[in-house]
Image (cartoon, rainbow, N blue to C red):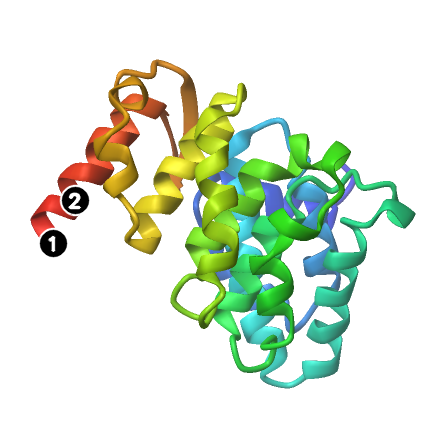
Amino acid sequence: MPSKTLKSTLQELLVQGRLEEVAELAPKKKRVLGSLVALTFDPDLQVVWRAIEAMGMAVERVAASHKGFVREHMRRLYWLITEESGSVFWRAPECMAECCVRLPVLFKSHIPITFHLLETLEEEDLEHFRPGAIWAIGRLIDVAGDGLPEVLPLVMEALDRPDPQARGMAVWCLGEVGETRVLEGRPDLLEDQGPVHLYRDRVVEETTVGRLGREVLEAAAQRS
């Protein structure tokens, strides 16, 4: 019987939720990072998101002894967004954000790049990248500095996009950045039945724009 490939081993670990073991492999086998990129194309959305989270964990481990290698990995993630690469790595914003959150000092130059992707990506690419770029803003808010005023209007604009995943990510992001007042005046959004996938606690949840909006407002009320 042929031995398992690295990719199939990682996929199995991700399915089982054993992300720490994935991260522990990375310093020994640097191909783990490239394999995790490949696994973001997996048909199982939970594997995709666990690969994104595991990538951040793995980068953190590898950086302890090979900072140059992870810097090159981050440069490659950004290159995979560009038109030159074919702009087909739709999960690049999420991967970049996860790595930046794990290593904000090492990747300080990449934080603003990732945070401002909604402004810099070509319009024809944004249809695919928009939900992930919005998620990246919410994920990065604690390390992003003062860039929110520039990107907030673009997050709010996504509330009226035809793609329910983009609307849902905008709702979630507004909760993460503490800008929920706009939702109070949008009863249409609170009743929006558009389907949304949200990754939390290593599980992909199926929800709706409206349910997510009500949850965000409830959480904001509890904090105030």
Mark 1 Cα-neighbour bin, 10 Å: few <14, some 14–19, many ≥20: few
Tell whether label 1 touches label 2 (CB within 8 Å).
yes
In this rendered view, identify the residue nearer to me: 19 or 138: 138
Q: Quadrant of residue 29?
A: bottom right
Depicted 133 relative to depicted 188: above or below = below
Is the residue 163 above or below the residue 212 in the image? above
Is 80 rendered above or below residue 199? below
Q: Secondary structure at mark 1?
A: helix
Task: Tell me residue 171's x, y (percent).
Answer: 36, 36
Going 73% across and 57% down the picture, which residue do you hit? 77
Q: Residues within 10 Å of mark 2 (few under 14, many from 20)?
A: few
Q: Quadrant of the C terminus?
A: bottom left
Q: Disc 1 marks which amino acid?
A: Arg
Q: Secondary structure at mark 2?
A: helix
Q: Quadrant of the N terminus?
A: top right
Q: How many marks?
A: 2
From this viewpoint, which residue is outermost toward the right?
Answer: 84
Q: Residue at x 10, y 45 (%)?
A: 221
Q: In the picture provided, is 183 more to the left or to the right than 196?
A: left
The percent position of residue 183, horizontal first and vertical second, equals: 27, 34
Q: Is residue 36 visible?
A: no
Label 2 and label 1: CA atoms lie apart by 6 Å
The residue identified by callout 2 is 219
Query: What residue is at 61 percent from the left and 47 percent from the top?
Result: 118
Q: In the image, is 40 to the left or to the right of 179?
A: right
Can residue 17 be seen in this snapshot?
yes
| Three-letter amino acid code of the residue under disc 2 | Ala
Residue that numbered label 1 is attached to: 223
What is the x, y in percent for residue 178? 28, 53
